Amino acid sequence: MAAKVIITCAVTGSIHTPSMSPHLPVTPQQITEAAVGAAQAGASVVHLHARDPETGRPVQTPEAFMAFLPHIKQQTDAIVNITTGGGLGMSMEERLAPALRAEPELASMNMGSFNFNIEAAARAIRDPSQPWERAYVEGSRDLILSNTFPQIERAMRELGDKGTRFEFECYDAGHLFNLAHFADLGLIKPPFFIQCILGVTGAIGAAPESLMFMKNTADRLFGSDYLFSVLGAGRHQFPMVTMGAIMGGNVRVGLEDTLYLNKGELAPSNAAQVAKIRRILTELNLEVATPDEARALLQTKGASNVKF
């Protein structure tokens, strides 16, 4: 029998701004409610960023995360996955600080440096409510998201020593080879949870051929030692994640990746996106993993061993 599908929900992210959608969670209470709602809808993993509750700007302090992490843990048994990508222009010290403080079951891990261009999203900022929004998004045109080999190795060692496992975010085929490099060094152990990200300008495009290429490459490099998951950016979300599920993979949805539920229709919540992909999976006769089933598949240390 095929393994059950793990649904990850990326709750708020660092790409979109409050002016783009009134449904984007910003305050600790909103982030908590969004994560709990996503879990109740069927997500077994919630991927979390933090924001300044006054301005909505992405922040990466341990204190900002600790304002909602304990509340999420109290209200759901979903696996908590903390970002180490942070927000645009943040240092590696800033990016690692929350995960090093909280020692979660999972943390994201970008697997290479690349041009991360989200300037097209600025078109959605018609009437900015905060002065930082437009410059923040448009500034990505001249941004290299830095994930050098020493930076990746440092994160793997420091978080790995705390028992945290990783969601390896691979935006291009070269990132899969980077992951294989670290696996060969023995710094990480299988099963590798690989998040294939399609549709970000500056990385691999969102097309069926791209997804098949990434999957075939991962098969060659890792054989049966990995779990495949798919993220489609923006309008590509549901077509790409559905294709990934058909190919035997896991799925990621959420307001970090797209603000929409259907064409021209803003998603009213993260839970609505989770409910939609769950309906699709059910129609495909695929079963959704519970949090404990996801823990077994990912071999995490368990919720009782985190520091929040």
Image (cartoon, rainbow, N blue to C red):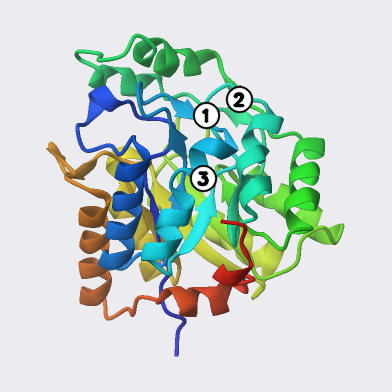
Secondary structure category for the residue under label 1: loop
Q: Earlier in the sequence, mark 3 or mark 2?
A: 3
Amino acid bearing label 3: Met
* Residue 76 badge: none
Q: How many angstroms separate mark 2 from mark 1 (CA)?
A: 6 Å
Quick check: marks 2 and 1 in contact, CB under 8 Å?
A: yes
Front tag of 1 and 3: 3
* Pointers 1 and 3 in contact (C-beta within 8 Å): no
Q: Earlier in the sequence, mark 1 or mark 3?
A: 3
Q: Position of residue 269 (x, y in %)?
A: 22, 48
Question: Callout 1: 10 Å neighbours few (<14), some, many (20+)?
Answer: many
Q: Is residue 218 above or below residue 1?
A: above
Q: Amino acid at mark 1?
A: Gly
Question: Going 32% across and 78% down the picture, which residue do you hit?
Answer: 286
Helix, strand or loop at label 2? It is: loop
Q: CA distance from mark 1 to mark 3?
A: 17 Å
Numbered label attached to residue 90 = 2
Residue placed under numbered mark 3 in the picture: 66
Position in image of residue 194 (x %, y %): 57, 58
- The mark found on residue 87 in the picture is 1
Contact check, label 3 and label 2, Cβ < 8 Å: no
The residue most toward the left is 265
SS type, badge 3: helix
Indicate the position of residue 61 as horizontal and vertical percent values. 57, 33
Apparent side of residue 283 relative to residue 190 in the rendered image (left or right): left
